[in-house]
Image: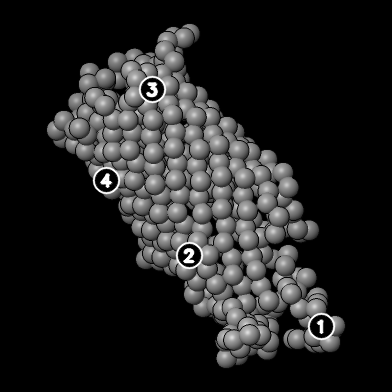
Amino acid sequence: MFKEAVKRLNRALLLLSALLLVEKGSADVPGFYQTYYSPDMEQGFLLADYSYFDESLDVLDYASKLNSTFRPSHATTTNFALGYRFLKQGLISYQRERSTGEITRDREPYQLDSDLDGDRIGVRWQIGQQMGLDWSLELAFNQREQGEFSVECYEYQGVVIGNCPTSALSFSDPDTLEPLPLLTTSANQDTWSITVLANHLVFDRFNLTHHVTLKRSDLEVTTQSPLFEIQSSFLLNSSFGGRKLSDLITSFKQDIPQETPWRETSIRYGASSAFLLADQWIANLQFSLLKTNRSGYVRVSGQPDYSTNMVLASSLWYSPIDNVSFFLEGMVTRHYLLGLDELTYNQRSAKFFEHPFAQLKAGIVLGF
């Protein structure tokens, strides 16, 4: 009975995942495997999901807890994936990610927009039965890039610098005399991961999947600014807002992501249980613990540092007919996206990780 119900849910073409309470979330390939261990398919699968956020969905009032001049305003994430069974035990998958985001501020800059693109390729191999468990292994590589975007001007410690009417100091190209933005920044992430999954049917209506994932991510944020290129001792010793410009620059540099690359290594253990409530209903509960370690990361004095996270997710699946399923899922984490989205953690954002993360997703699954 349980296996037949899971089959209806496992034939997967994931088309929609929405209704978010915070700005990041997706039902990607790893999450799909952890929720349902053995997707039932003839040759492969297609997967797509869409996540949406705006301020009206912040029913937990997350933004007010951030203690920051920045507020999340609007964000979307879209994932498309293709899986192909090249051997009886082997499955290769490719996933494409596209994210856009907008944040607002009560001072310059009043609005910032950014885009992120990612590609993930993974190979999963069914190892077989060992110690009463059904084992599989996935090796994956994920590359993500945040597109270059510019900040025209910025108000920092009461001083406005850059290309806007209220600036105390602005910059222009020496050849064209065109105004220059204060900051130009981009970021990229390369991640290798290996995941071991073990599954067993506890009894007819209850299935349990364990997973252990080891990830190594190389991260780099590139920030360029004419402010950092000032060499004039007259300007560096000039007073802006009651402070020397050189001191202001030093402090500002500590408040943005570091110039040199760093590495984050994380290990995650999780258990996912699926319980057959009725022929057409399955409830899923997942609990995970994460531990991270960073090398080459420069922690600023007085800045918080977080290295552990806890994830709890629960979903309810309804399959009215074969190959069609609907789900509603909620997820809560203890420390924001720690260990889940490595690009989000840097010197500028570390303080946000004091707070929990919550999301609500609704979706539909069509199988073939």
Measure the alpha-carbon separation of dots 2 and 1: 33 Å
Mark found first going from the N terminus, 1 or 4:
4
Q: Nearer the viewer, residue 197 or 43?
A: 43
Indicate which label's residue lies in the foreground, 4 or 3: 3
Mark found first going from the N terminus, 3 or 1:
3
10 Å neighbourhood of mark 3: few (<14), some, or many (≥20)?
some
Q: Which residue is mark 2?
A: 114
CB contact under 8 Å: marks 3 and 2: no
Q: Residue 15: which numbered mark, if any?
A: 4
Identify which residue is drawn at 62% across, 58% down.
221
Quadrant for residue 100, please give it. Answer: bottom left
Indicate whether 39 appears above or below 324.
Answer: above
Q: Amino acid at mark 3?
A: Gly
Q: Amino acid at mark 4?
A: Leu
Say if residue 141 shows up in the picture.
Answer: yes
Mark found first going from the N terminus, 4 or 3:
4
Q: Secondary structure at mark 1?
A: loop
Please state if 48 lies on the left or on the right of 75 as rendered. Answer: left
Q: Which residue is mark 3?
A: 90
Identify which residue is drawn at 75% across, 58% down.
300
Quadrant for residue 74, please give it. Answer: bottom left
Q: Which residue is mark 1?
A: 232
Q: Secondary structure at mark 2?
A: strand
Indicate whether 103 appears above or below 216.
Answer: below
User: Quadrant where the C terminus lies?
Assistant: top left
Measure the alpha-carbon separation of dots 3 and 1: 62 Å
Q: Secondary structure at mark 3?
A: strand
Q: Secondary structure at mark 4?
A: strand
